[in-house]
Image (cartoon, helix red, strand yellow):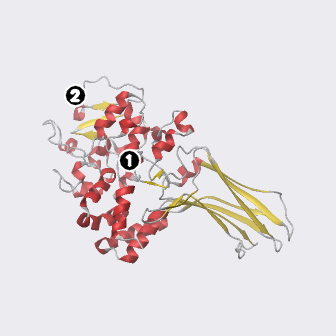
Amino acid sequence: MVSVGMIVAIAAFALVRNAGSSADREPTATGTAEFLKRHWRQPLAPQGQAPARFSPLERSPAPESCGACHPAQLADWKTSLHARSMGPGVAGQLVGMWRSDPESARLCLTCHAPLAEQAPGTPGFDAALQAKGLVCAACHVRGHARFGPPRRDGSLAGPAPRETLPHNGVTRTPAFLAAEFCAVCHQFETDGYALNGKLLENTYAEWKASPAARAGRHCQDCHMPDRRHLWRGIHDRDMVAAGVTITLDTDRPRYRPGDEVRATLTVTSVAVGHFFPTYVTPRVLVRLALVDGAGRQVAGSVDEHVIGREVTLDLAREVSDTRIPPGGRAGFTYRRRLDRGGLRLAATVTVEPDHFYTRVFESLLASGAGDGARILRAALDAARRAPFVIFARTLSLT
């Protein structure tokens, strides 16, 4: 059973941010390092007073205000997990934490709702803005100044004088195209919380040691294709399916009753720039079983294997780690003797993006979640609907 205290620990360890630390990760250039050190210095300062000539639209940090001139980016953001980073799973846990441990609750916000205006007790706090999660301004606005990537042609400035442009134009920097930009929320420090000698959040380091990094492919190249603000990941079937290849082979094409079936299902990470999966939250379930001509499962014929990093709910112990490194593969062997003719081998690979959180929400609700129960029930319902199949194949055996 998970206690509220354990959930506080989960929030503190699993959601902590590496404030202003990207400069220590050997970024691509000194300018990038210095920019990121300033840009992500914690806590983020409130925006303060906007220049007098700024319109109400320009003064607002709400994503809808940005979308007035950037509708495509707003539309993409609305479909992303960034827009749901303060969804019911986080919000439900924070309900009690604000009373029992406000510092830990505030720590969660440094990645899930990082603007000063999203944190209670700071100047200009806006509860509605907090609920919107990781908004445009979190990455692109500091002190009402706008920041973004180089133009598509690589230039850092356009022909028009900045003072003639909306919100005084934008300061452009290659930092927005570098993996280090993402590392601030997707990498623990080397002395951060670890289990079995491995950091709980290690995505940037996994990428840095990967073939993708050696080929010069950064996080944004896969998760923000054509600069779209999508951030597709483990919750997106097409994204996951494109990152791996899955094969199912038998040692011979046909068997007779009494023969032993020997089959191998192989999952190869071909385009994932970090471990598959990278974090403790998801689980990938490989399932093989014999079925009859009507599709009924043969009793006692099921084999299941997990690809993932399993940890205890209190984050005290790593149970197993069967993840696949970038460019690596995992093979699962199936052996069963056929007791009759007409049987087939059915194989599925199912991704459960919120496996860990499903267990957390179930335990919290079972132990009494207080004021957060209603929100957590919504989170649990969403987590249970999240799994999807990326591979399904049935082979005739006889």
Question: Farthest left residue?
Answer: 52
Task: Please give the name of the residue rendered at 38% of the width and 47% of the height, measured from the top-left corner.
Answer: 185
Dot 2 amino acid type: Thr
For residue 398, say whether it is visible.
no
Q: x and y percent of residue 125 in the render?
A: 19, 53
**Considering only vertical position in the picture, is 66 above or below 215?**
below
Q: x and y percent of residue 34 in the render?
A: 32, 32
In the picture, the quarter occupied by the N terminus is bottom left
Tell me the SS state at disc 2.
helix
Circle 2 sits on which residue?
Answer: 164
Please tell me which of labels 1 and 2 falls first in the chain: 2
- In this picture, residue 239 sits left or right of residue 64: right
Task: Please give the name of the residue rendered at 47% of the width and 49% of the height, measured from the top-left corner.
Answer: 232
Picture quadrant of residue 19: top left
Circle 1 sits on which residue?
Answer: 185
Residue placed most toward the observer, 38 or 378: 38
**Considering only vertical position in the picture, is 209 above or below 337?**
above
Residue placed most toward the observer, 354 or 58: 354
Residue placed most toward the observer, 167 or 269: 269
**Considering only vertical position in the picture, is 317 above or below 178?**
below
For residue 9, say whether it is visible.
yes
Q: x and y percent of residue 355 in the render?
A: 49, 64
Label 1 packing within 10 angstroms: few (<14), some (14-19), many (20+)? some
Label 2 packing within 10 angstroms: few (<14), some (14-19), many (20+)? few
